[in-house]
Image (cartoon, grey):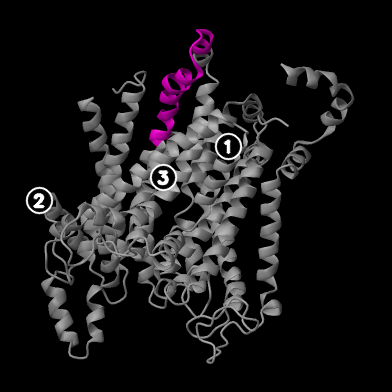
Amino acid sequence: MARYILRRLLQAIPLLLLVSIISFFIMQLTPGGPMAMYLMNPKVTAADIARLEHLYGLDQPIYVQYFKWLWALLHGNLGFSYKTGQPVLAMILSRLPNTLELMIAAFILAVAVAIPAGIFSAVRRYTFGDHVVTVFTFMGVAIPSFWFGLMLQLLFSVQLGWLPSAGMMTIGAPFSLLDRIRHLILPAFMLGLLSMAGWTRYMRSSMLDALSEDYIRTARAKGLAERVVHWKHAVKNALIPVITIMGLEIPSWFAGAVITETVFAWPGMGRLYWDSVGSRDYPVLMGALMLTTFMVVVGNLVADVLYGIVDPRIRYD
Amino acid sequence: MEDMQLELAEPAAAEPKELVQSPWRLAVRHFARNPLAVAGLVFIAFVTLMALFAPVIAPYKFDAIDLFNIKAPPSAQHWLGTDELGRDELTRLLYGARVSLSVGLLATLLSTLIGLVVGAVSGYFGGWIDTILMRFVEAMLSFPSLFLLIILASLIPTGIDVKAMVLILGLFGWMGLARLIRAEFLAIKQKEYAEAAVALGVPTWRIMLRHFLPNALGVIIVSMTLGVGGNILSESALSFLGVGIQPPTASWGNMLTNAQDYVWNAPWLAVWPGLAIFLTVLAFNFVGDGLRDAFDPHSKR
């Protein structure tokens, strides 16, 4: 197992390199370079820009810049923000917990709804309840997530006034768990909705597959109660493919976080990324991209390892 | 048990007729029995007509400004209200349909073409070509592409137009189809008729056209239908963030860019474009799902 994990992590290195090269070179395409925006300030002259570019090493050839960046990265240094001068790693790490909090809440919400709904739908196939669940999953997949977020704000914040529409906590108020949870509900629902709908459908079809297996017939033939057959035999096997899907969806969760954090003014990594695009703060963008890709790799790996725990037939070698 | 007896009782008369039907006609009949899919198709036809005839139907010019009615609620004069510049919301919605639909369709066409070529090459040649291409596909898939799209979109100094949007979405949306096509291709390669064709010396391109394409057509059509919905969603998300189609061109996404600021005092501005996106994407997904069932030889009835 340890060897398998190690090998997978080693395999991720070419991927991370590829991602870093692509992103690095795309950023170089910017007309005028990252400092060009300072030219909008009438007090900044071309000479100032040239001095800044020299200071940041931007006057060197692209590949030299890239290798310098890579060399620093290998020493655990993601560089310094053009905008604030802070170390990029520290900036990202200060935002990361907020994004993770949002993602974990959304994940729990999505699993808590999707798995039971999928099981229900499969067990009662072609009944009214199944059709209702199916229509809801279609709607969940088709709804633009940012608009869903807006509608949540419109309904629960503007019209009903039940929940706050932005931020992580009430500013100036002392820490209170209830306050944090109230701020978390709407963004978590927005971020989790797409997966909630998708996983429900996967769970339904995977449960249907499991229910048609021979061991289910055996279990029924033994005279086990239908409830035991479903929960002990079918659900466990039906979960396996769903777990893989969950792992594969991790990239879209980071994309979703950018949009969710924008709509709900959530001070996470996505918002940091979004703000850095606006200010052309490339070191921060590169750092966020690398960290995101790394977490995607790790997420897929966790999904594969979990796969093996749920299904003992799978061997790692 | 009851079901079986019922089926046994009546079939004899109907059977010969069923046999004559071509797979395509069967698929059409199958599709026509799916009410959600048919409803979706009707809705898509409706939106397409609205988009095509927008200049005729729209009550105002697409950038006409009514200074006396800024952020006006829905009324007889402006059915869906007006936006922050006093432009008629219904008119913008109709013109937005043109942009959103054409971006969705063209981007899907582009990504289908790329996916088809990559998948076919990978599946047909196999070996190291396959390995390299599939590694590349994996890399692209594990990449949070929205991050790159945001950078790309923010790079274009004049802002994004329909063409740029189509390129961006098309170039980042082909991986799923490439995998499907490759799998389809590998499966067909195993079939006796493909081996026979190779043994007879039929040229590669001919095998691809004659044997492979007709077999994979179902997969392609389904993935295209679902792709249009997906691309409409992506366009709207990018435009919402402000890095998509630039005003004054209206797209359903960029009509929502400022909607968040108006949720408090002009909520209808946030409602209509989103509803249009939602219903259109829903319609495409219903149709795609109906087609999948219709093309699936395993599905009964």
Disc 1 is attached to a residue of which chain?
Answer: A
For this orientation, the residue located farthest to the right is: B13
Amino acid type, mark 1: Asp
Image quarter of residue B206:
top right
> Which chain is indicated by disc 2?
A
In this view, the residue in front, A187 or B139, is: A187
Q: Quadrant of the N terminus of chain A?
A: top left
Residue A158 appears left or right of B187: left
Residue A271 position in % (x across, y down)? 28, 63
Q: Give the prevailing secondary structure in the magenta stretch.
A: helix
Disc 1 marks which residue? A130
The residue segment tinted magenta is A218-244
* Residue furthest top as drawn: A222
Q: Which residue is mark 3?
A: B137
Mark 2: which secondary structure?
Answer: loop
Question: Which residue is at a point 70% across and 73% down the rendered structure image?
Answer: B53
Circle number at residue A75 = 2
Q: Chain of mark 3?
A: B
Asked if the residues shown at circle 2 and circle 3 are in contact, with their CB atoms under 8 angstroms apart, the answer is: no
C-alpha span from label 2 to label 3? 30 Å
